[in-house]
Image (cartoon, rainbow, N blue to C red):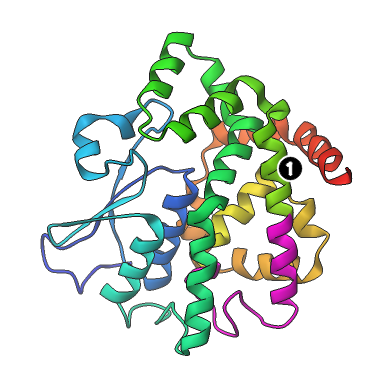
Amino acid sequence: MENSSERPGEVPVLYHNDMSVCAAKVRMAFAEKGVVFDGIHLDIRAGEAQHPDYVKLNPNQVVPTLLHRGQVIIESNVICEYIDDAWPDRGTGALRPQGALDRARMRLWMKRLDEGMHAMTGVVSTCVAFRHQHLARKPEDVQAWLDKMVDSARRERMRSCVYQGLDSSYFVDGVRRFDRLMAEFDQVLGQSRWLAGDQFSLADIAYAPYLVRLHHLGLDDMIQSRPAVRDWSERVLDRPSFKAGIADWFNSKYLTIFERERDQARKKAAEILST
């Protein structure tokens, strides 16, 4: 793809991470638009998002962060809407529904991620897989990583996930909350093709990385057991933008850990949901 509409110095710059679900949705939005970005990859596990120079751009110490035309935009859902505004007619066209009601529905689904479901993704991902990356480090390095977290609730949540894994109470809560979310999806998708109505939108893009993460973690029974959710998931993951923005960025080191831990996580989740 060529970025012929961008003048020199106006090519968007994206600070991101290959396996970050938040960065993945932004890359998928760019792919839908056919817009090329200059990427700066950060190693989250190594603490690169906590580097003082990056914290000046994003005080939350997370990815993604977008730089465009001299301005900084943070928060992945906000960035996705910015992309739709900045390149309205590129690629597949508008990524927000035209109707006021469907657009409100789109925003409510995206808001749902920001108000808890994204945090639950960090929980289940860490409890199943990412904890092993941390436990392979020196204890003092893990403690330093935790101490630098500006959000104390996140710090305690991650401490439990790293050291307790599947036995963490946060994991139990995360599995149950994802199952409830999939049940809600099933109701909505039984009546419409996409989350916000009959038009593919930023709501579907926003959840695409979470769908594949549940699969990677062995927690996708809650998707496969619901036909409407399963069919929608297949439609989302079949889009070329999913491959370009998400699948092409899969990190083999992470996939190896997912594969090793998946069966145990699947069994644990089944036990949780059966009670």
Is residue 246 something one can see in this rendering? no
In front of the other: 173 or 84: 173
Residue 61, compared with residue 213, is above or below; it is above
Image: magenta residue range: 180-204
Q: Does residue 258 belong to the magenta stretch?
A: no
x 48%, y 55%: residue: 114
- Measured as percent of width and height from the top left, residue 167 is found at 73, 26
x 68%, y 59%: residue: 181
In front of the other: 181 or 133: 181
Secondary structure of the residue carrying tag 1 is loop
Residue identified by numbered label 1: 218
- Measured as percent of width and height from the top left, residue 171 is found at 68, 36
x 75%, y 78%: residue: 190
Looking at the rendered image, the quarter that the C terminus falls into is top right
Is residue 73 something one can see in this rendering? yes
- Measured as percent of width and height from the top left, residue 131 is found at 58, 25
Residue 6, compared with residue 159, is above or below; it is below
Horizontally, residue 62 falls left or right of residue 133, namely left
x 50%, y 49%: residue: 21
Looking at the rendered image, the quarter that the N terminus falls into is bottom left
Q: Quadrant of residue 42?
A: top left
